[in-house]
Image (cartoon, helix red, strand yellow):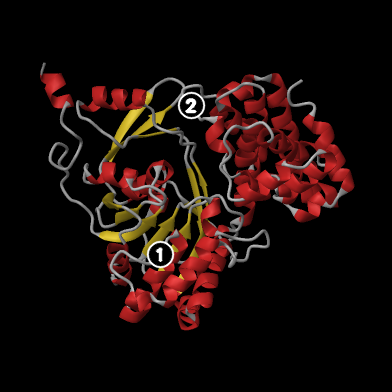
Amino acid sequence: METQQRAQRTLNAQTFPLPKRPPIRIVHLGLGAFHRAHEAWYTWKADSEAEWGIACFTGRSPAAATALASQDGLYTLIERSATGDTFQVVSSIVEARDGSELARLRELLRAETTAVVTLTITEAGYHLLPNGALDLDQPAVAADIQALRQSEDLPDNGGPSTPIGRLVLGLGDRMSARAGEIAIVCCDNLADNAAATRNAVFGLAQAADPPLASWIAENVSFVGTSVDRITPRTTDADLDIVREYLGLEDHSPVVTEPFTNWILSGSFPMGRPAWEDAGAVFVENLEPYENRKLWLLNGAHSLLAYTGLQRGHTTVAEALLDPYCSRWVQEFWDEAERNLPSKELQISAYRAALLERFSNKRISHQLSQIAADGTHKLRMRALPVIQAELSAGRPATGAMRVISAWLGWVQGAETIQDPAIEAIRAALQQDGRKRTESLTATIDQQLAQDPSALELIEKLAGSVRS
């Protein structure tokens, strides 16, 4: 009876008191499971003196903030290995707010004590063209430009609607307040994500407020990262497990694997947590590590998603047990490895570790979750390998199969989440080679103009269901 009564109480600062809550020094945009499993966990693990609190703002939906705010930012992190679970209550998030609460965001970015902004807004959230520049013709971007031009007359919660637009608005406040420099840390799976973030932020500021763009160029440090921790969606069963373990209701637990990796490159002019104490690594040249993760982990995930879904599988572990899917992953990895500095990155050990991580059946990583936003993801996960292999005179069969599998998936999927959905729908109205060409063009125009590539993509499509 006592356990049942306790289980009706919610995890919060009253039921799980802490000796000290940290002051807010970090603002995070894109509150979700991965942030809580990764950057927030690293901050909590490294910040023994509780000096680096995080204020988080949601992206698409306020639900995550509502649930977490009711718990004073506390949540349970479940590390799920193949043999069992371990539990940690993480306390680095001090505030959780709806992304539309611009008055609070602006207040925090005006504060001299705010030193770092971190981002997990998904690849599509940057609104970049394939060449890396900001897509000024995107309706949401165009609307943000107009809102930023009227920023002095905005109501407290009015203004830009995209995370980058809201960040630029806050940076304008920081400039006006003379609050000093700041570091922006991209934690999304973008190639050269520091440059991508700079292009999005600077490009929007330049279009809306050129003096602000000049201030950003001089006062904002853009830090690149490679992030790695498989984090599936939390299920009702996970809520039950936490309830049994804590004797408390936790509406915001996160399930993740024991493995974690964070590599960063860049400067922090106003300071940062000692993330290296939690295992983060700081390097001068981030690109090889970025590519290793994007091609080997994320690329294999996309390949398993698009082939596995067509072959009747639902999770990464299920798809990897399929001998066809497993063979195709190895084929793709062989091509990717040829274009990575293998000795420096210990590719053989990394591949072996990935197979072990992917095979963890207790991590229910849904293929449907991975399949979203394919046009953005494949430009970074498969296209660079294709380009490198073709430049070397090789056919890039393994990497081409990723593109081919995506084409096959979109032609049969009931629901497609993708920033290029209108172009995809238009392409699906066409037939034969024209359809192949138009779908491929949503990923890369140059590849779509290569007859040999299109022929191979069509040839590979027939093998997925065999």
Comes first in the chain, label 2 or label 1: 1
**Which one is in front, 444 or 327?**
444
Q: Position of residue 8 (x, y in %)?
A: 16, 27
- Describe residue 378's horizontal placement relative to residue 234 as left or right: right
Q: Which residue is mark 1?
A: 166
Query: Does 218 appear above or below 237?
Result: below
**Dot 1, crowdedness within 10 Å: few (<14), some or many (≥20)?**
many
Give the number of callouts.
2
- Describe residue 268's horizontal placement relative to residue 95 as left or right: right
Q: Which residue is mark 2?
A: 364
What amino acid type is highlighted by mark number 2?
Answer: Ser
Query: Does 27 appear above or below 370?
Result: below
Q: Position of residue 332 (x, y in %)?
A: 73, 36
Secondary structure at badge 1 equals helix
Residue at 77% across, 36% down: 398
Q: Position of residue 275 (x, y in %)?
A: 40, 52
Note whether residue 393 is visible. Answer: no
Q: Quarter of the image holding residue 171?
A: bottom left
